[in-house]
């Protein structure tokens, strides 16, 4: 049987033949593929689909200032829609893009707009919020850490992404920090995850995070306990702000070994007090909850987005389709997503610059969950 290596994740993909005689390759990891009347045509379409995705992402050159955001969004609207959550309809997605674009235009990102690194971090944070369908600042905040920003979702972002709309996978989602002085019990009984927490004051330092939700298919509560050190290991791979922090600290230690007390970055001296660890201080609980929530819920979000894409935002109930039909519609929807033209987009003129400072104060109250 013919095989092809996925050019994105390098997984070997076997060719399949549908009951209607159509050949297709489909990568479960990357949710891309190609189909055709012959094996060669399916292979060529698979590679072409990968190239289209790459070209789509390549157009993401970050805006250099808040005033460039409307033009940047308008130029990249098709790719933004393709990267956004697929379980809400197009008009709602357009409104969400509009609202979140206004947010990044008015939020106080401090020095982030001054460097290319910071500008791209704003793009990544914006797209992450769009992927979850998170309305800003209602469902989270984009928070500056030094010269870059990172999106911190509130619990409402996970709830919206996984408990709302048609056929949601979960209900009763919760993400709780465990502190060193807390009293707690955790057990799994007959497939049910049980967590009981008794809080005391002072609570001490965060030592772990518990994620749980009621699974609508299994009709049971599922969950996981994440040790804080395990989450920090995950952050080394997935948190852009933490990776930058670790790189800057390593560079500083090397400079200190040579007798210097600073590093040069963006033509500016940075001392140890200038290099902020996003996983220490007041933001530590929310950052750890973010990593735990993404670790546990991300696979379910990917599946939900893939299923919604296969429906092409219509009213077809995906649960009634065969696996083969789902794959074929996903391939069709993926190709169609690159043909979105003349998408309506507008941002109202913002003439009150005081919004930026007001937004900073509002961000401080986002996570009182």
Image (cartoon, rainbow, N blue to C red):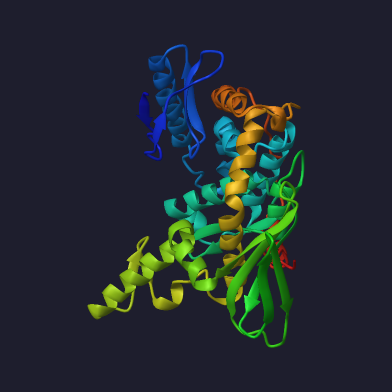
Residue 166 position by quadrant? top right
Residue 192 position by quadrant? bottom right
Residue drawn at (65%, 53%), measured in percent from left and top?
A: 106
Q: Is residue 264 visible?
A: yes
Expressed as whole percent of the image width and height from the top left, the position of residue 65 reads 53, 48
Which residue in the rendered view is the most extreme toward the left?
A: 258
Is residue 113 placed above or below 262 in the rendered structure? above
**Image quarter in which the N terminus is found:** top left
Of residue 140 and residue 183, the one placed in the foreground of this image is 183
Residue drawn at (51%, 54%), measured in percent from left and top?
A: 113
Is residue 340 placed above or below 111 in the rendered structure? above
Which residue in the rendered view is the most extreme toward the bottom?
A: 202
Q: Is residue 147 visible?
A: no
**Image quarter in which the C terminus is found:** bottom right
Is residue 137 placed above or below 47 in the rendered structure? below
How many numbered marks, from 0 up?
A: 0
Which residue in the rendered view is the most extreme toward the front?
A: 190
Expressed as whole percent of the image width and height from the top left, the position of residue 75 reads 55, 32
Residue drawn at (47%, 15%), measured in percent from left and top?
A: 36
Of residue 256 and residue 315, the one placed in the foreground of this image is 315
Residue drawn at (62%, 53%), measured in percent from left and top?
A: 297
Q: Is residue 24 left or right of residue 107?
A: left
Expressed as whole percent of the image width and height from the top left, the position of residue 218 reads 71, 50
Expressed as whole percent of the image width and height from the top left, the position of residue 57 reads 47, 36
Is residue 217 placed above or below 337 in the rendered structure? below
């Amino acid at each position: 049987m013919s095989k092809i290596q996925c050019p994105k994740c390098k997984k070997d993909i076997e060719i399949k033949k549908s009951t209607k005689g159509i050949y297709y390759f489909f990568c479960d990891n990357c949710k891309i593929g190609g189909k055709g009347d012959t094996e060669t045509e399916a292979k060529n379409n698979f590679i072409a689909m990968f190239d289209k995705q790459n070209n789509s992402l390549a157009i993401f050159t970050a805006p250099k200032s808040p005033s460039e955001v409307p033009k940047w969004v308008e130029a990249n609207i098709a790719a933004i829609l393709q990267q956004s959550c697929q379980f809400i309809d197009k008009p709602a997605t357009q409104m969400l893009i509009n609202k979140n674009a206004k947010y990044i235009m008015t939020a106080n990102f401090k020095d982030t707009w001054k460097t290319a690194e910071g500008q791209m971090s704003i793009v990544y944070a914006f797209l992450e919020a769009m992927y979850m369908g998170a309305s800003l600042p209602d469902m989270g905040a984009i928070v500056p850490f030094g010269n870059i920003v990172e999106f911190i979702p509130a619990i409402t972002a996970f709830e919206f992404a996984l408990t709302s709309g048609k056929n949601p996978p979960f209900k009763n989602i919760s993400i709780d920090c465990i502190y060193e002085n807390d009293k707690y019990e955790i057990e799994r009984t007959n497939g049910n995850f049980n967590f009981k927490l008794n809080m005391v004051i002072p609570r001490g330092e965060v030592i772990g995070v518990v994620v749980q939700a009621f699974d609508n298919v299994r009709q049971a509560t599922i969950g996981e306990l994440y040790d804080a050190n395990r989450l920090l290991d995950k952050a080394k791979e997935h948190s852009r702000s933490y990776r930058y922090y670790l790189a800057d600290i390593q560079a500083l230690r090397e400079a200190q070994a040579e007798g210097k007390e600073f590093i040069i970055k963006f033509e500016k001296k940075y001392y140890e007090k200038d290099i902020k660890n996003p996983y220490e201080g007041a933001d530590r609980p929310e950052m750890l909850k973010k990593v735990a929530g993404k670790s546990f819920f991300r696979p379910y979000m990917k599946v939900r987005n893939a299923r919604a894409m296969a429906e092409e935002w219509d009213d077809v109930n995906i649960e009634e389709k065969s696996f083969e039909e789902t794959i074929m519609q996903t391939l069709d929807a993926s190709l169609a997503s690159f043909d979105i033209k003349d998408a309506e987009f507008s941002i109202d003129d913002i003439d009150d610059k005081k919004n930026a400072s007001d937004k900073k104060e509002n961000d401080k109250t986002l996570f009182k969950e």
